[in-house]
Image (tube, rainbow, N blue to C red):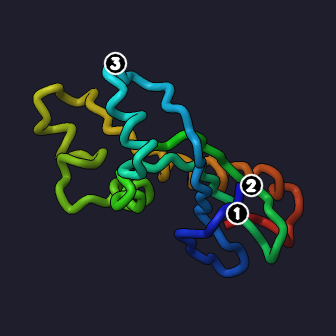
């Protein structure tokens, strides 16, 4: 599987990257009673991909998080890493959503990407916590 960097940001010394790799031949394992999702995957209308977030210094990774089997419309893959910043607050986890949503304050919209970034940074910080000149992000 070949990963491609699709998003990154830099701190003073570290780089955080989101890398994705298309999962060709993916067999959908979610709720698909009529086979519609698998048919869309087979036709190329949808794509499946694996993603990983890495915290790097140069070419060395100090923290990472991985998610496999994401399925998106082929022309909407970037929503994996952009949807959590949707301009409509009803499409993201925020205080406006929690105050106004009919389901109340316990509503959660699942955006994996921000949690992947947090997890990779936390892992790097934990690894480097006792190395004073190498403290992460």
Q: Give percent across and percent down for residue 91.
A: 23, 48
The span from disc 1 to disc 3 (Cα, nearest Å) is 39 Å
Q: Nearer the viewer, residue 11 or 75?
A: 75
Residue bearing mark 3: 33
Front position in the image: 51 or 123: 51
Question: In which quarter of the view is residue 19 placed?
Answer: bottom right
Q: Residue at x 66, y 67 (%)?
A: 137
| Residue at disc 2, secondary structure | strand
Give the label, 1 or 3, closer to the camera. 3
Q: Which mark is residue 63?
A: 2
How far apart in space, not on screen, are marks 2 and 3 (Cα)? 38 Å
Per the image, the residue denoted by label 1 is: 55
Q: Nearer the viewer, residue 31 or 122?
A: 31
Q: Secondary structure at mark 3?
A: loop
Query: Is 7 left or right of 76, judged from the image as shown?
Result: right
What whole-number distance in Å separates the C-alpha atoms at marks 2 and 1? Answer: 5 Å
Residue at figure coordinates x 49%, y 43% from the top left: 70
**Mark 1 element type:** strand
The image shows residue 48, relative to residue 128, as above or below, that is above
> Is there a contact, CB below 8 Å, between mark 2 and mark 1?
yes
Along the horizontal axis of the image, is 115 left or right of 40?
right
* Earlier-in-chain disc, 2 versus 3: 3
Classed neighbour count for the residue bearing mark 1: other residues with Cα under 10 Å, few (<14), some (14–19), many (≥20): many
User: In the figure, is residue 53 to the left or right of 70?
Assistant: right
- Residue 52 position, x and y percent, is 64, 53
């Amino acid at each position: 599987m070949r990963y491609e960097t699709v998003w990154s940001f830099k701190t003073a010394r570290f780089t955080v990257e989101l890398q994705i790799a298309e999962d060709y031949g993916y067999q959908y394992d979610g709720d698909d009673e009529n086979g519609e999702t698998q048919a869309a995957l087979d036709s190329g209308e949808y794509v499946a991909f694996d993603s990983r977030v890495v915290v790097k210094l140069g070419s060395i990774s100090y923290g990472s998080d991985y998610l496999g089997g994401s399925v998106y419309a082929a022309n909407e893959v970037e929503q994996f890493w952009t949807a959590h910043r949707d301009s409509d607050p009803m499409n993201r986890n925020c205080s406006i959503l929690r105050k106004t949503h009919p389901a109340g304050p316990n509503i959660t919209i699942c955006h994996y990407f921000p949690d992947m970034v947090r997890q990779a940074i936390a892992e790097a910080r934990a690894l480097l916590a006792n190395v004073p000149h190498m403290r992460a992000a």
